Image (tube, helix red, strand yellow):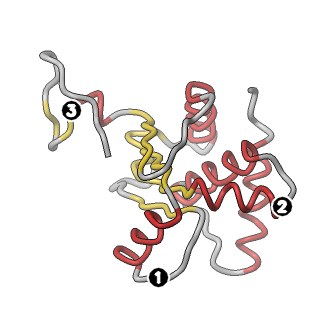
Amino acid sequence: MSTLPPTEHDEPIDGYFEHERLGIEFVVEDVDFELADAEELTSWVERIAKVHEHEIVHLTYIFCSDEYLHKVNMEYLDHDTYTDVITFDNADDADIIEGDIFISVERIRENAQQHGVTFRDELHRVMIHGVLHLLGYADKDLLSQTAMRKKEDDCLSLRTF
């Protein structure tokens, strides 16, 4: 993953430089992908966090290939399966968002085709799905999956772009 080099005015805080630590970062690993509407997506995700009374301290989206995400799934979760998204919550406090959301671009393309939706809409759904996990929503059983899907739909309806 790439980070911005420090400037002469940056002071390290817990191993991070201030501009690396705050806000939302988009990273691409092992896949040919360019994110459209990054500024609008950032504003939208920040708005969702604010509505849920959370502050985004540092959120990194990592867009990657199926194989890259499969390796992450195996190494950190011991799951030998392909998936569209994996979320790691790094926050110490309940009212902040600090984490990493890994998204398989290949899986998003396939899911969009299977569900008859645009790549853009499926990508946004999965991006906000990861945020909802960081906000405390679960999807382990049918009832929580249904609630998560409704929450995703509510968040998607708040897009203004």
For the residues bearing labels 1 and 2, Cβ distance under 8 angstroms: no
Q: CA distance from mark 2 to mark 3?
A: 41 Å
Q: Which residue is pictured at 44% across the width and 73% down the height?
A: 73
The secondary structure type at the circle numbered 3 is strand
Q: Position of residue 92 (x, y in %)?
A: 33, 56
**Residue identifier under label 2:** 115
Q: Which residue is pictured at 51% across the width and 43% down the height?
A: 54
**Viewer-nearest of labels 3 and 1?**
1
Q: Amino acid at mark 2?
A: His
Q: Position of residue 149 (x, y in %)?
A: 76, 61
Residue farthest to the top, as pictured:
9
Q: Position of residue 80 (x, y in %)?
A: 48, 83
**Residue identifier under label 3:** 17
The secondary structure type at the circle numbered 1 is loop
Residue farthest to the front, as pictured:
32
Which of the marked residues, 1 or 2, is nearer the chain's N terminus? 1
Q: Does residue 135 sit above or below 156 in this rendering?
A: below
Quadrant for residue 137, please give it.
Answer: bottom right
Q: CA distance from mark 3 to mark 1?
A: 33 Å
**Residue identifier under label 1:** 79
Q: In screen coordinates, is 132 left or right of 12?
A: right
Q: In screen coordinates, is 89 left or right of 108?
A: left
Which is nearer the eye, 57 or 9? 9
Q: Amino acid at mark 1?
A: His
Which is nearer the eye, 80 or 155? 80
